[in-house]
Image (cartoon, rainbow, N blue to C red):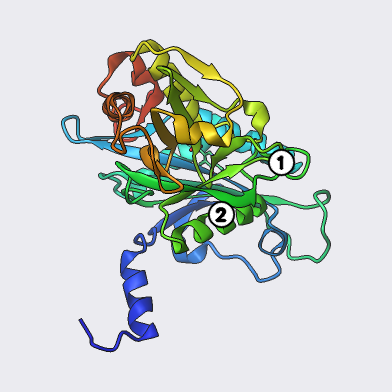
Amino acid sequence: MPTEWTQADQLDAAAEAAPSKPSFAFFRGRIVPYADARVGLLTHALNYGTAVFGGLRGYWNQDEQELFVFRPLDHFRRFRDSAGLLRMDLRVSEGELWDGLRSLLRKEEARADRYVRALAFYGDETIGVRLHDLHPEVALVSFPFGRYVENDESAHVCVSSWRRPADNVVPARGKIAGAYVNSALAKSDAQLAGFDEALVLNESGHVSEGSAENVFIVRGGIAATPPASEDILEGITRRTVLQLLRDDLGLEVAERAIDRTELYLAEEVFLTGTGAQVTAVTRVDHRPVGPGVMGPVTRRLREVFFDVVRGRVPRYRHWCAPVWGDGAKP
Ligand code: PMP
């Protein structure tokens, strides 16, 4: 360890911590070397945020020597819906996106846990803020990936001073690239202040979600999460977890508005997302959640969740699409 920690050293350390670059990309309908999938400086999406994206995970199942992508058709449906909100006609179906992803993952020799980024963006190199008379491009890339929230068994979150944009400002139920400036502001302010993650209120002052996660509380033994009308992204993990809580943990679940102080009074708080998976929150704004350690519902939910995503639960096996297997459609 050098005594003088220079900026160059820090950049080297950051490069080491960054995920390894993909070798290939699915771009313009075919697999190309990642280095060849390039765009120009005037690209509309780069200048105006006119892109939408998706984030999926592939889970390696060691026993079956299989990589399972979790709910790809649901992710691609939301991806196409998000694109539709920006008036993009992607001219590619969910099934075709899955075929492209599967080919990409095979080409990448994907045999470990991975993240998949789907991206649709206006690729025109032109000046002028608008959504019409532009041409969308579609890309998929994937790389090995572990945890997104480092401290996912005992996260300390803050309530951010930033507000979640209302649906009439930027459509919240679309995964719209430009809107993620809001998430980036909230996340950096939280992390630089020593928190693991930020929770963001909407303009009504209700809890909406984390910077890249949906949020749940357990209060009075009932699990609750904000409804879709609270300016949230309609998370695939949120939908999955609602079902697991109800059907597998036998809990009563409610989709209802949540006030900030309920976070302080809840027995348990947890975050859900493709990146965050199920992240236990044990402190909010320096207050312990319940006894300040992961609660029994979150613990049990994490066990069930990780079994489900790795394809170990037969009744949820249809959510897990095999990359190397016989190619049956998910
Ligand atoms: N909210 C936001 C703002 C997000 O970025 C994400 C991550 N996609 C989520 C919620 C969780 O969504 P999902 O479970 O579909 O990953």
Residue at 37% in and 48% down: 149
Label 1 lies in ligand 1 vicinity (Cβ under 8 Å): no
The image position of residue 206, as x and y in percent, is 63, 35
Q: Quadrant of residue 14?
A: bottom left
The image position of residue 201, as x and y in percent, is 62, 41
Q: How many marks?
A: 2
Residue at 38% in and 49% down: 148
Q: Quadrant of residue 49?
A: bottom right
Give the mark, 1 or 2, whose residue is nearer the N terminus.
Answer: 2
Q: Is residue 8 left or right of residue 138?
A: left
Identify the residue under disc 2: 186
Q: Amino acid at mark 1?
A: Glu
Label 2 lies in ligand 1 vicinity (Cβ under 8 Å): no
Q: Amino acid at mark 2?
A: Ala
- Checking the image for residue 203, the label placed there is 1
Residue with the most extreme bottom position: 4
